Amino acid sequence: MGALYPQFGTRNPTPAYVIVNFDVLDEEAGLAYAAVAQQSILDHGGHYLVAGATPKPVEGTWDSSGFVVIEFPDMDRIREWYDSAEYRRAREIRKDKAQVTMLFAEGTPPEGFSRPA
């Protein structure tokens, strides 16, 4: 409990992010997936930082039409969400109906990098 609630002791968790590039192939399935996925994200402590944005490449190439960034309290919460029955259901809805690239990343910048004041 302490890892999720610093006031109870232990260390302060490092925020972690889910970064997704996607192309929806079936609009109806995409909307059904989004509804189930969004609820599962909220149920596991996540929240959207960027949702459904159309990327505007400035360097290199970009192969998707949508982009999502989701923040969770820590990497453990991401794993719990991703492996949950609710999100498995969302993935089944999405199967063969969208092209998706997803990655997980912890979010604390290295020492010496810019941080907001």
Image: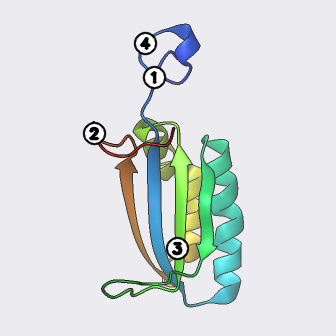
Q: CA distance from mark 2 to mark 1?
A: 20 Å
Q: Which residue was labeled with disc 2?
A: 112
Residue 12: mark: 1
Q: CA distance from mark 3 to mark 1?
A: 28 Å
Q: Which residue was labeled with disc 4?
A: 10
User: Which callout, 4 or 3, points at the residue further toward the start of the chain?
Assistant: 4
Residue 98: mark: none
User: Which callout, 2 or 3, points at the residue further toward the start of the chain?
Assistant: 3
User: Which callout, 4 or 2, points at the residue further toward the start of the chain?
Assistant: 4
Left or right? Give the position of 68 relative to 30: left
Q: Amino acid at mark 2?
A: Gly
- Asked if the residue under mark 3 is in contact with the one under mark 2, i.e. CB atoms within 8 Å, the reply is no
**Measured from the top left, where is residue 99 in percent x and y?**
45, 82
Q: Secondary structure at mark 3?
A: strand
Along the viewing direction, whichever of 38 and 59 lies nearer the viewer: 59
Q: Which residue was labeled with disc 3?
A: 67
Crowding at label 1, few (<14), some or many (≥20) Cα neighbours within 10 Å? some
Q: CA distance from mark 4 to mark 2?
A: 25 Å
Q: CA distance from mark 2 to mark 3?
A: 28 Å
- State the residue at coordinates (62%, 67%): 51
Q: Secondary structure at mark 2?
A: loop
Residue 20 sits above or below residue 55 on the image: above
Q: CA distance from mark 1 to mark 4?
A: 7 Å
Along the viewing direction, whichever of 6 and 60 lies nearer the viewer: 60
Q: Amino acid at mark 1?
A: Asn
Along the viewing direction, whichever of 43 and 96 lies nearer the viewer: 43
